[in-house]
């Protein structure tokens, strides 16, 4: 029997750390019914709308996905569709939720501005948790088999209003994978119990660390630094940490336009806690794994990973 991509990742003991997809903001559109492999453009959105949104999202900092209620989707298109617009940067989280009759109003959105935290005026402010579990069957068998089952199970319980099936989130080999809004935290290797734990902990403002892949608003090398501090200091507050880039000028916020990954194999970041503590974290990029399958359909990715080399307390940023 051929191993699935998730089986291979487990056999290689591939770490979840610093594997979250990079997105400073998310646009999630409710689209019931079946999806194609490229779900946003191969779905029941008005013709050409999905492809246009995907094109506009390139290099904008905003990722566009589609979602639906778990289980059998209705054949008829709904009178309205739920839409989430979430800016997920640490310390700047904000989300708006709208129910729209005509999805073409989404063409009025400025996706680059959304990624910068500029409000778009659609819908109402919301802090309600929404968990999107990847279940895109035509993209990957692991997501369909594992993610779909988890979403259907939780949809039958007390968390039914918070759980949605979603299109591709990145990282099929970590199925089941999930995105939690409004925070943009990403999780992997979930089962029913751990997925419920993610929601329960988030209701208390806490992270479920064992399945945490990283925060999508952070570049992956900053994800590695953040997770290293969380593990070293047992910090679980979702909004407890931010990560800054270290240069000759000191520690500064990472900004759009700065490359998401440094060219050097080793770099330094400063992780700051809301209580005033700070740490300098040295992170390294290395080929710790062989090239392996990203998905069950044979896409291969290099075995390059970001990992923390050292975590050192530094001068408090606030006293």
Image (cartoon, helix red, strand yellow):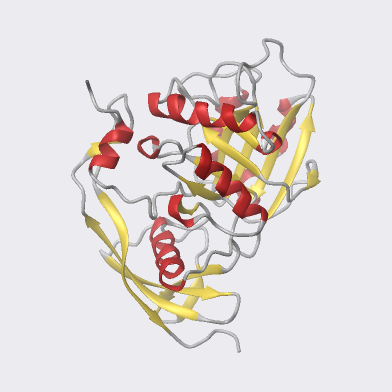
Q: Residue at x 71, y 35 (%)?
A: 161
Residue 246 visible in rendering: yes
Q: Residue at x 66, y 33 (%)?
A: 157
Quarter of the image where one finds residue 275: bottom right
- Picture layout, residue 319 above or below residue 300: below
- Picture layout, residue 245 above or below residue 115: below
List x then y, in percent, for residue 5.
30, 32
Q: Dividing the image into 4 quarters, which one contains the C terminus?
A: bottom right
Q: Residue furthest top?
A: 75
Q: Residue at x 31, y 24 (%)?
A: 297
List x then y, in percent, for residue 14.
29, 47
Q: Dividing the image into 4 quarters, which one contains the N terminus?
A: top left
Q: Residue at x 64, y 59 (%)?
A: 205
Task: Compare residues 105 and 92 and report the one nearer the observer.
Answer: 92
List x then y, in percent, for residue 288.
21, 53
- Picture layout, residue 152 above or below residue 272: above
Residue 56 visible in rendering: no
């Amino acid at each position: 029997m051929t191993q699935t991509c998730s089986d291979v990742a487990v056999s290689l003991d591939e770490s979840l750390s610093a594997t979250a997809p990079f997105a400073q903001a998310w646009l999630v559109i409710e689209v019931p019914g079946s999806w194609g492999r490229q779900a946003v453009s191969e779905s029941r959105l008005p013709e050409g709308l999905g492809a246009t949104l995907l094109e506009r999202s390139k290099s904008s900092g905003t990722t566009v996905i589609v979602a639906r209620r778990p289980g059998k989707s209705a054949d008829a298109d709904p009178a309205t569709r739920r839409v989430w617009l979430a800016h997920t940067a640490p310390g700047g989280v904000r989300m708006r939720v709208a129910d729209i009759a005509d999805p073409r109003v989404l063409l009025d959105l400025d996706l680059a501005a959304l990624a910068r935290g500029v409000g778009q005026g659609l819908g109402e402010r919301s802090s309600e948790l929404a968990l999107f579990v990847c279940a895109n069957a035509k993209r990957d068998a692991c997501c369909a088999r594992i993610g779909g089952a988890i979403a259907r199970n939780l949809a039958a319980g007390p968390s039914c209003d918070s759980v949605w099936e979603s299109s591709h989130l990145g990282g099929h080999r970590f199925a089941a994978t999930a995105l939690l809004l409004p925070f943009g935290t990403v999780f992997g290797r979930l089962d029913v119990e751990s997925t419920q734990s993610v929601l329960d902990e988030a209701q208390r403002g806490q992270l479920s660390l064992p399945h945490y892949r990283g925060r999508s608003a952070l570049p992956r090398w900053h994800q590695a630094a953040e997770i290293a501090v969380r593990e070293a200091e047992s910090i679980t507050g979702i909004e407890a940490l931010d990560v800054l880039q270290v240069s000759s000028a000191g520690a500064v916020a990472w900004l759009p336009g700065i490359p998401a990954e440094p060219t050097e194999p080793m770099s330094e970041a400063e992780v700051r806690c809301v209580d005033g503590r700070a740490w300098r974290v040295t992170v390294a990029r290395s080929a710790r794994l062989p090239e392996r399958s990203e998905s069950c359909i044979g896409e291969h990715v290099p075995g390059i990973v970001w990992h923390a080399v050292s975590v050192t307390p530094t001068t408090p940023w606030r006293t």
